[in-house]
Image (tube, rainbow, N blue to C red):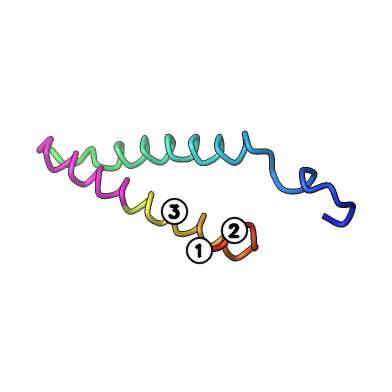
């Protein structure tokens, strides 16, 4: 930002989207493996979906905190 080039700072946009997608896939895999002890399929799917929803809400809150806190954008 000091040199006036606003495209030179931060992480590349491809990484901004790729890193959370890869982490979400790994997290979903681990969450599914973690529900293996539940023998009823509907319980396993319910717990898995609840974990995904909680994870997404936490991710969305962190992204909003970063974007608003760093001054990139405001609400």
Q: Earlier in the sequence, mark 3 or mark 2?
A: 3
As measured in the structure, the alpha-carbon distance from the residue carrying label 1 to the one carrying label 3 is: 14 Å
Q: Tell me the mark number nearer the camera, choosing from 3 and 2.
A: 2
Q: Residue furthest bottom?
A: 69
Secondary structure mainly formed by the magenta segment: helix
| Secondary element type, mark 1 | loop
Q: Confirm whether the magenta stretch covers residue 6.
A: no
Estimate how packed mark 1 is, as few (under 14), some (14 to 19) or many (20 or more) residues with alpha carbons within 10 Å.
few
> Above or below — where is 8 with respect to 74?
above
Q: Quadrant of residue 26?
A: top left
Relative side of 1 to 21, left or right: right
| Secondary element type, mark 3 | helix
Q: In the rendered image, which residue does mark 1 sit on? A: 75
Relative side of 6 to 32, left or right: right
Q: Tell me the mark number nearer the camera, choosing from 1 and 3.
A: 1
**10 or 33: nearer the viewer:** 10
Whether the residues at callouts 1 and 2 have beta carbons within 8 Å, the answer is yes
Instruction: Point out which mark residue 73 bears.
Output: 2
In percent of width and height, residue 70 lies at 64, 62
Residue range (magenta): 40-53
Q: In the rendered image, which residue does mark 3 sit on? A: 60
| Secondary element type, mark 2 | loop
As measured in the structure, the alpha-carbon distance from the residue carrying label 1 to the one carrying label 2 is: 7 Å
Instruction: Give the quadrant of the N terminus.
Output: bottom right
């Amino acid at each position: 930002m000091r040199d006036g080039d606003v495209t030179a700072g931060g992480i590349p946009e491809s990484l901004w989207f790729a890193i959370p997608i890869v982490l979400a896939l790994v997290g979903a895999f681990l969450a599914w493996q973690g529900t293996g002890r539940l023998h009823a399929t509907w319980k396993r799917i319910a717990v898995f979906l609840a974990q995904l929803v909680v994870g997404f809400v936490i991710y969305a809150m962190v992204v909003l905190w970063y974007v608003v806190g760093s001054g990139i954008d405001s609400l």
